[in-house]
Image: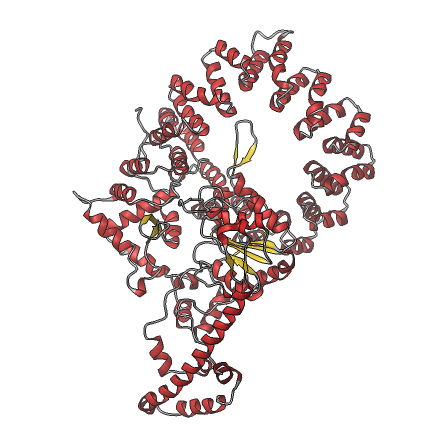
Amino acid sequence: MLAAVGLSSAWWLPSLLQLLDSYWSLSWEERDQRASVFGMVIGGISAVLSVASIWQSRRSYADVNAAAEVLPVAAGRVGVLPRMKVLSAGRARVHEALPLPVDYGRARRRHWVPWQAAGDLLDSDLPLFVDRNASQEVAKWMRPARRKGGFLLLVGTSSVGKTRLLYDIARRELGDFLVLVPDLGDGAAVNALAEAGPPGPVVVWLDELQRFLSGPYFVPDGTVGQVPVSAGALRRLLDGDTPVIVLATLWPNYLDQLRATDTDDKGATKSRYPAAADVLALRTKQLRVDTFSEEEKRLARELGIRDPRLAAAADGVDFNVTETLAGAPRIMQRYREAPLTRQAVVHAAVDARRLGIQGPLSRELLREASRGYLVDVHPDDTWFGDAVAELTRTDRREDAATAPLQTIPTADHRGIIGYTVTDYLLQQLLCERRSELLDSITWNAFIDYVHEADDRHRLATHAWQRLQYHHAERLYRTLADRAADAAVRLANLLTEQGRTDEAVTTLRPHADAGDSEAAEGLAELLLDRDEFQELFTRADAGDIEAAVLLADTLVHSPWAGPDTVDDAVALLSPYADKDLYAALVTAELLVDHDRDDEAATLLRPYADDGEAEAAAELAEILLRQDRMEELYTRADAGDVEAAAALAKRLADEGMVDEGLALLRPHADAGEDSAVFELGKLLAKQGRIKELRARADAGDSCAAYELAHLLAMQEREEELRARIDAGDSYAAVMLDALLVKQGKADEAIALLRARVAAGDSQAVVRLSDLLVRQGRVDQAIAVLRDHVNAGDSSVASGLARLLAEQDEQQLLWREVHAGNRFAFHPLIELIRKAGRSQEADQLLVWGVSSDGSPARPW
């Protein structure tokens, strides 16, 4: 009945509008005199509408919940999944906004406007949604995803509105989908959903994706389900018959870290966090969300007529709209105006995060670490309790969501595990404090009160990267018994300081346990110490690294003779038949001494088993020997390396079509060697049409070759069209083309736009171009801005440029910030300045806590 009266019927609307018109025609004095009567009338109508609205929303909610699904028993804890349309903003982890003004209700009654009569009442927790520049693209992606599923990742810094954008567009476009919103770190819920199978079309909501991936930001809190999301589980969900849509958000610096790679001593590149990289390599659509543009601010101002929170936020000068709504001005005010004792606690918390400590920060850790920032005498700890109480205070409504420190409750919410820093403040201070040195008091507190192994390992790495070798040694010693990589790092430090006995003792248990990096380090130490007897003993006992090092030493020794190669091969033979690495080393040794037949015989079994490195080396040997029949036989049997080698030879002899025919099936199957060679051959023949088709189908090698061809032919418009379609190779080639045409300023403008869109590769290209144009200061500024914001992918470029400009002070700042590419260029500059003794001391002992060269300890 209420719904029928309040919503279905509109008989009351003309009378209400007439009443409003008569009210607005009165003077302000007359309005005040009649406000109480008018307010009672409008209040009564509003009450009816509100009750009707609540009744209808509850009925809708009940209907939706009745349609929600309960997961099968295999999914366990997940339970009932609601529909996306009824997911609350709080459950979706949309950042809590500043509240409505206290006098909002009174202002509404005194200055009533017609739109409010239609029931457009404001949510006290959620401001009106401002359509973003990315809204249309997000919605466009979601529509086909309704049928086939997909993975959408929004990347942006803190408080730019990533989660709110996803929330509103998903409710609009995917409202009838079920939605799984696991607690932070509860990857088991997602893995269980994959195991049980989705009960219907499902959205998997992974806001703050870094908290679900194996890596530095995954911090288990001991509650049920605290395991990382696996790439296999997400792949099963995405590839299943039922549409599953994964929606996620991530900070740019977190994305850079999770995708980071390292190069080992053999020159091989490997992922630093392979499990996280596997997830990020799934069929993911990645979109960048930036702070409000001028057009978005204009839309916010228009909505500000209806929502006072938007009106205030849109008029902000120092903070953008979403930042203001999230309380950033108040957060920063509480930090900036805090006394030094409170700032000391904040700095300790931020620096803990800066140095890789991702777990909850205990009260004891913060108390002891904060003392490193104090300037006055504080004989007891009463100051600390007061500081923490004020920093976490949220008792007054205007302080909600603006506390600089946040408490982390226990699973039962009866106590506090520890503390963390509010996201926005953390983001700002990570940049501001990037190069700040820590007092030894703070270092010691971190070492003494951080107990989780991963946190200690990251802390040790940060100490090592900052040349804080004394602190690094303490940490690595506590880790070396259990972690081989920590033992290797500790042994390297000890070796540099001439403490080789300790280094050997540190490495030997891990080498005995079969760790190849420890075995290699131990073998090199034994060789340097001329301990050949132990080397031979280890080689005889199955230590491949010892055998390889001994063989290399034999071949390159001054006393090497005709039989030396035979001796080296004999030393390696017991391993070459069962270990690929030993086989490749032996084959390389044989090839270097013109013994190709023996090398081919050694490599064939590995190539037959599908080992790509062995197959590639074997194909090169066969090609060199003109053994075409065997190459054809191998290619027919599915050996992609043989097919690639044959295709190159056929193309060189003018039989391009035959070569392409060999490569296409392998390239269509996604085999890297074939994809690479096919792209090169098509480009060499100028076959743009096929290159374009393959590039559009996702072939990155074809995309590169196509862009290169278009640039060579100066087909600028086609390059621009490909850039608009998201082709990063086309952007690289267009930059080069514009410079070649003398349009450097246009190239710089294009690169700046790419940088603004989040293209890290464009940052390096922009800095290089600015340097070539003589604008070195601008180039340094571009690189520093991105490094300061956490983009580690351009750290090497910044270090190189600073070294070229002899900027020792700036290089020192990079060293103190942990830029591992800055140290050796700095050492070279110090040597060139005639301070070789200082350089040697730094190499061996690093720096003390105050940044001066450390003395031996």
Where residue 101 sits: x, y (%)? 34, 71
Q: Report the number of numbered marks.
A: 0
Where residue 255 sits: x, y (%)? 50, 47
Which of 10/280 is in front?
10
Which of 801/647 is in front?
647
Q: Quadrant of the C terminus?
A: top left
Colour basis:
secondary structure
Identity of the residue furthest to the front in this view: 73
Which of 101/762 is in front?
101
Q: Is residue 484 left or right of residue 175?
A: left
* Rendered residue at 52%/27% (across/down): 265
Where residue 347 sits: x, y (%)? 31, 47
Residue 735 visible: no
Determine whether 644 is above or below 40 in the image.
Answer: above
Where residue 37 sits: x, y (%)? 34, 90
* Rendered residue at 70%/23% (across/down): 605
Determine whether 749 is above or below 99 in the image.
Answer: above
* Rendered residue at 45%/75% (across/down): 54
Residue 692 visible: yes
* Rendered residue at 50%/40% (across/down): 797
Q: Is residue 492 left or right of residue 586?
A: left
Determine whether 593 is above or below 672 in the image.
Answer: above
Which of 776/816 is in front?
816
